[in-house]
Image (cartoon, rainbow, N blue to C red):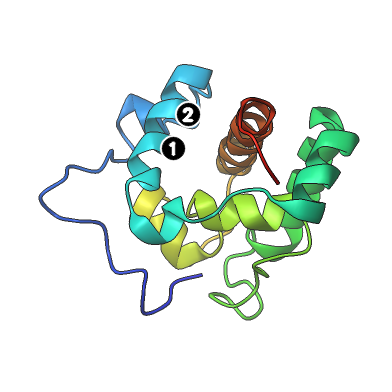
Amino acid sequence: MPDSSDPPPDPSEPMPRASDPASDPSDPSPESLDQRLAAVARHPFRAKFHLRGRERATAELSGPSALRWHAYDLIAKRLAPAEPYKDGKQTPYRGHPVFVAQHATATCCRTCLRRWHGIPKGRELSRAERAYVVDVICRWIEREVAGARTRPGP
C-alpha cells in the first residue's frame, strides 16, 4: 500500500523491468527472486518489514505449503482482479505473514505491482503473474524464517 513514506523508487538506481530476468514470471528461480527482493529491500519503507511475534510464529508453525496456499487465496481475492476492492488500502499491515510479506515485497496493491514489478493495472492478473507474486511473497517469508533462526531475540 503506497503511503507518504513510500515514494517511487530512486531513478538513479535502475529497477529491473518486467523483461529483466529478476522479474520474469516464467523464471521463478530463487536467484531471480532474491535479486528482486534485494532491489525492493533497498527502499527504506520496504526494509522495515520483518516477521515478528505472532506472524513469525504462524510462518514457522504453518510451514511453506500452507503459507503458499494462503498466499494464492489472498492474492486471488485481494490483488488479482482488474480493479481490486479498496485498491491501495486492501492489505493490512499485520495479522498474517502474507500481509507483512506483501508490504515488504511491494506486492500489496496494484500500484506497487506496477511500480516495482512492471505488472500493469486495469486488467486481471494472469495465472503466471499470480504465481510470480506468490513466489515473491513465499521466498521473502522463507528468507525471514531462515534469518530468524540465525538472529537472536524476538
Query: Does residue 42 appear left or right of residue 83 in this picture?
Result: left
Seen in the picture, residue 146 relative to 50 is either above or below; the reply is above
In the rendered image, residue 149, in percent from the top left (x then y), is placed at 69, 27
Instruction: Residue at 36%, 79% (x, y): give it.
Output: 4
Q: Which residue is mark 1?
A: 37
State if disc 1 and disc 2 touch (CB < 8 Å): yes
Camera-side residue of 67 and 130: 67
In the shown orientation, is residue 118 left or right of residue 87?
left
Tell me the kind of residue under disc 2: Leu
Residue 121 visible at all: no
* Residue depicted at x 65% and y 73%: 90
Place of residue 27 in the rendered image (x, y in percent of width and height, measured from the top left): 48, 22
Q: Residues within 10 Å of mark 1 (few under 14, many from 20)?
A: many
Residue matched to label 2: 33
Q: Disc number at residue 104? A: none
Give amino acid for label 1. Answer: Leu
Q: Element at badge 2?
A: helix
Element under disc 1: helix
| Direction from residue 149 to residue 103 in the image, left or right | left
